[in-house]
Amino acid sequence: MRRPSDDIVSWAIIEVLRSHGVIHSQRKLAQMVAARLRDLDPAYAVGEGRLRRIALRIPQVEVQVELRQGGDAKLDGCPCCGARLHARWGKDLFGKRRLQGRVCTACGLHMGAEGGVPSRYVFIWRSGRAQGKRRRGSRGSLDAFPST
């Protein structure tokens, strides 16, 4: 198995999402992208986690995360992209400081104070986004990708 570059994987994600619009499962996207990559080279393979992290960097792709309650393990980073989580604090009616939730510094994922475990990723193609406009943090542009 060979590992394709991030640019080739990004191109395959864009091709798949342009043709389908919305894909309601990370596994389904991985199967479709793998099929597209096999058209280029039968030895190419890509994992679901890497695929999700690359999709987060594409400005025209919106990634929605559905969280479920559970997972007592302490969160070290964002379950979506792995970046640092920023705690959001507020005060209750008695003036005590309480944790309101957490926000990812890179992808913008919001979660409640209880946290959560991702149960589903939804990938949406947003063709109306300008290529130069960045949606989440500092992301790259699509200038280096092959045009179709």
Image: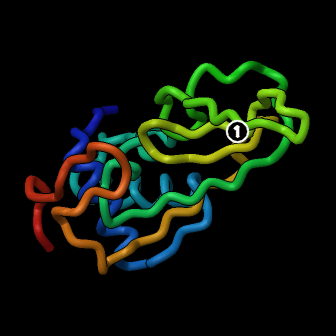
Residue 126 in sight: yes
Residue 79 appears in which quarter of the rendering?
A: top right
Q: Which residue is mark 1?
A: 101
| Rendered position, 82 above or below 31 | above
Q: Nearer the viewer, residue 56 or 132?
A: 132
Q: Nearer the viewer, residue 61 or 28?
A: 61
> Could you tell me which quadrant the C terminus lies in?
bottom left
Residue 61 appears in which quarter of the rendering?
A: bottom left
Q: Nearer the viewer, residue 32 or 57?
A: 57
User: Which amino acid type is shown beneath numbered disc 1?
Assistant: Gly
| Rendered position, 9 above or below 123 | above
Q: Is residue 65 left or right of residue 134?
A: right
Indicate the colouring scheme: rainbow
Residue 40 appears in which quarter of the rendering?
A: bottom left
Residue at position x 51%, y 74% in the image: 22
Residue 45 point in image, percent of width and height: 37, 40
Q: Nearer the viewer, residue 19 or 64?
A: 64
Residue at position x 45%, y 78% in the image: 21
| Rendered position, 31 above or below 102 | below
Residue 115 point in image, percent of width and height: 75, 36
> Could you tell me which quadrant the N terminus lies in?
top left
Q: Is residue 121 left or right of residue 44?
A: right
Residue at position x 26%, y 46% in the image: 139
Q: Is residue 46 left or right of residue 117?
A: left
Residue at position x 68%, y 33% in the image: 89
